[in-house]
Image (tube, rainbow, N blue to C red):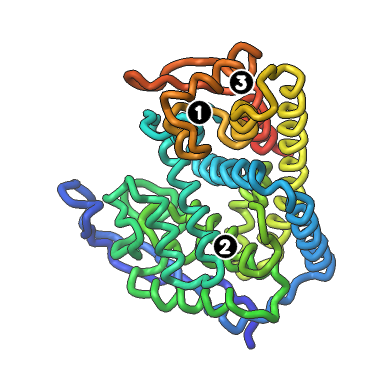
Amino acid sequence: MTSLVAVVYEDVRWEPQGRRFAGEVLPRYGTYHPAVPASIADLVLDLPSPVAAHAESASREIARFDSELGGEIAPFGAVLLRSESAASSQIENLTASARAIAEAELPGGTAKRNAESIVANTAAMQAALALSDRVDADAILAMHRALMVNEPRHAPGEFRTEPVWIGGGSTPIGATFVGPRHDLIPGAIGDLVAFAQRTDVPALAQIAVGHAQFETIHPFTDGNGRTGRALVQALLRNKGLTRQVTVPVSAGLLADTSAYFAALTSYRDGDAAPIVQSFTQATFDAIANGRRLIADLREIRNSWNDAITARSDSATWKVADLLTRRPVVNAALLARELGIESTNAHRYLNPLTEAGILVASTSGPRNRVWRSPEVLAALDAFAERAGRRS
């Protein structure tokens, strides 16, 4: 067993090569300093007692939150998953309104670029949860493939074969951080997986360290942050902290992104306590925010009961329930989600429109859509609270 040690850095001559640099005029010489991540497979995670105790409290809070929503998984599980995806994207400065994201998810709908990226991030989160029983290199590649499916230049589902860096300019010379040489990636990922599969490390601290190690390895040309936070969701499920819902940890990290990025730097300097603290506080912030979102959605849905005049056996009520997790709908979505024939969709949408619950508009040629302003406002309020620094 070993203690965490600081990352060391190599001296490597800069010679541009690979797809990213084809046709570009760049400096042909210089030295850059890629990281050599320390092995963590046998890491003894020695944290200060208050940090370890706070992390254990956060773990219990995650399990409690997951248990609370057990009977209402259908609406709120989907909402929390999308909220986590949007928050993870926002950390990378990819932002979009709840309406834009919802419209991007519609069958046959049109999408703005940022909204499309956030929808892809949701797919990566879904892949992470689906693969949580076997967190390994193949699962990580599948998460990245789902995330970057519309970005072929970034080799979806493949480890990089060229340098990648943070900060600096168009070359890694003078960059803030340079990921390890690509030939080190398979071994480093294998080491990370071995650490993640251990059962003798407190779960939340293990997840925080695993995430920091993944971001240090930086195995892809793009999407490392979002894939790394999808990995967090896979590990939360794998370790049994969550069983049914997504805890929007990224929404908690958004509350102080400077502290989050500083914690990653501290980890690379050999101190794991700040990243564990960052994840612990993010957990408490995320759950508080998630509880408020769910309370808002419950209140909105209950308020509709008196406004809807449809018969008790009408599918209008099923549409109303659907709106809490899919606040923008069209006929194709109702057919897919509820089995309502497209030609009958208006029969169930009109009562909701007349009651002021839905507003009709268009999204692309001949594509009529209906949206719930109240639910969209609640989702935007969640995002605004997440982005507000504490």
Q: Quadrant of the N terminus?
A: bottom right
Q: Residue at x 41, y 57 (%)?
A: 144
* Distance (Cα) linking label 2 and label 1: 29 Å
Near mark 1 (Cα within 10 A), the count class, few <14, some 14-19 or many ≥20, is many
Residue assigned mark 3: 373
What amino acid is at disc 3?
Pro
Provide residue 34's location: percent of width, then percent of height.
40, 66
* Distance (Cα) linking label 2 and label 3: 32 Å
* Distance (Cα) linking label 3 and label 1: 12 Å
What amino acid is at disc 2?
Ala
Taking the image as drawn, is residue 253 in sight?
no
What amino acid is at disc 1?
Val
Q: Earlier in the sequence, mark 3 or mark 1?
A: 1
Reply above or below: 304 against 191: above
Say which element carries label 1.
strand
Q: Residue at x 67, y 38 (%)?
A: 386
Residue assigned mark 2: 234
Label drawn at residue 297 = none
